[in-house]
Amino acid sequence: MQVGCQTDRVLLAAAVAVVHGAAVLFMLSGALLALRWRCALYVHAPVALAILAVNLAGAPCPLTRLELALRADAGAPGYSGGFLGHYLFAPLGLDVHSTAVQLGMYTVAVGLNAVGYGLLVARPRHARSVRA
């Protein structure tokens, strides 16, 4: 493999990691963004459900698999523990597979989305009661 091709693969892997991070942030904040921009709801709901389905099924994340494949093609080292384990929890010295970390991840994700969607559901009732 040529050096330029290796560099391209590493850059693509980094781009996939950035997109992956953006998807995680959007999954966490999309319901809250929909309070301001209602159209975000039409993108957020399927993204959040897809991420939840992958996590609950225990399946490997397609974005993580793509990033790792690109890294391997470039001869760069891979990682274990998944995207969040590698980029977020390992630098903090936390084990992504520990019960406390898993509970914390799901609590934050479900909590933020429950608040966002709860406010979205409550908003029309509030608007009707103000007009009356």
Image: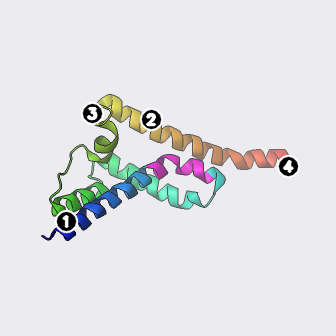
Instruction: Find residue 62 and report its image quarter.
Output: bottom left
Give the percent coordinates (x, y) of residue 41: 57, 57
Judged from the image, the secondary structure of the residue bearing numbered disc 3 is loop
Which of the numbered marks, if any, corresponds to residue 107? Answer: 2
Q: Earlier in the sequence, mark 1 or mark 2?
A: 1
Q: Which amino acid does label 2 sit on?
A: Thr
Badge 1: residue crowd in 10 Å (few <14, some 14–19, many ≥20): some
Contact check, label 2 and label 4, Cβ < 8 Å: no
In this rendering, position of residue 118 left or right of residue 105: right
Contact check, label 4 and label 3, Cβ < 8 Å: no
Q: Mark 3 points at which residue?
A: 95
Q: Name the residue under label 1.
A: 6
Can you say whether 59 is above or below 2 in the image? above
Where does the N terminus fall, quadrant-wise? bottom left
Q: Mark 4 points at which residue?
A: 131
Q: Is residue 64 magenta?
A: no
- Magenta highlight range: 25-34
Gap in angstroms between the C-alphas marked 3 and 1: 31 Å
Contact check, label 3 and label 1, Cβ < 8 Å: no
Q: Earlier in the sequence, mark 4 or mark 3?
A: 3
Judged from the image, the secondary structure of the residue bearing numbered disc 2 is helix
Viewer-proximal residue among 104 and 86: 86
Q: How is the model colour-coded?
A: rainbow
* Mark whose residue sits in front, 1 or 2: 1
Gap in angstroms between the C-alphas marked 4 and 1: 62 Å
